[in-house]
Amino acid sequence: MLPIESLIAFAVIYAVDSVTPGPAVAMVTVRGATMGVRRTAPFIFGLVFGDLVLFAIAAAGLIALAAALGPLFVVIKWAGVCYLLYLAYQLWNAKPVSLPSQPQRGEGWRTFGVATLLPLGNPKAVGFYIALLPTVLDVSTLTVQAYLELSAIVVIIWTGTLFTYAIAAARAGVLLRAPAAQRLLNRTSACTMVGVAGTIAARD
């Protein structure tokens, strides 16, 4: 087991980075407000899984592999940009509807794969982990058990952060019953999606 001070240091740094609003948080907030927490959950799980993949690459020291997959990362990044623009188009043209008291079932899991690809489209996230790990522990002593401990921290903090944003957005969304309010939310969300797409597209 890693020293408790190393686990705490990793958790604190990762938590601070996680709660800082970014593209993932923006998307989860929009989906939470417009679709509800239940239908946003698969999207959140996809984001967490994609982040775990990046963490595994960094923890294993596979910097060369990340570099070799550069073209693939570019393809994934642009696929994510296209998805965001498509989502923005749908939101901008969405008609006001009666908001259900509970989200519908049977939808949402198809977004798991898309959400998994979004973190993978940002190779700089690998750099974050590569930069973070040596600051809290001796990477040469990173065992399977230590990796699992750190992975658990990633899952707990990132999942908790995203669900917190989704729940807060969903509770605010319940108040938006008026058609004009819904139209404003949809078009504001569409602009947010375009901004997020631009942010991702502008990354090196």
Image: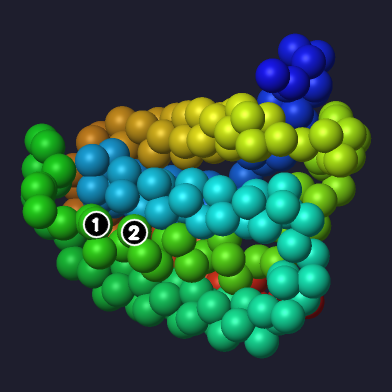
Q: Name the one closer to the observer, 189 or 137.
A: 137
Alpha carbons under labels 2 and 1: distance apart: 5 Å
- The residue under label 2 is 112
Q: Residues within 10 Å of mark 1 (few under 14, many from 20)?
A: some
Q: Quadrant of the N terminus?
A: top right
Give the answer, above or below, for where 192 lies relative to 16: below
Q: Name the one closer to the observer, 48 or 140.
A: 140
- The residue under label 1 is 109
Circle 2: residue type: Phe
Q: Name the one closer to the observer, 18 or 63.
A: 63
Residue found at x 58% / y 66%: 120
Q: Name the one closer to the observer, 114 or 104.
A: 114
Residue found at x 10% / y 35%: 101
Give the answer, above or below, for where 199 lies relative to 8: below
Give the answer, above or below, for where 75 lies relative to 107: below
Circle 1: residue type: Trp
Q: Which mark is residue 51?
A: none
Residue found at x 52% / y 65%: 118
In the picture, measured across the screen, residue 52 lies left or right of residue 47, that is right
- SS at badge 2: helix
Give the percent coordinates (x, y) of residue 142. 77, 36
Residue found at x 37% / y 71%: 87
Give the percent coordinates (x, y) of residue 63. 79, 65
Give the percent coordinates (x, y) of residue 185. 36, 54
Cβ–Cβ under 8 Å for marks 2 and 1: yes
**Which of the 4 image quarters holds residue 9?**
top right
**Which of the 4 image quarters holds residue 196?**
bottom right
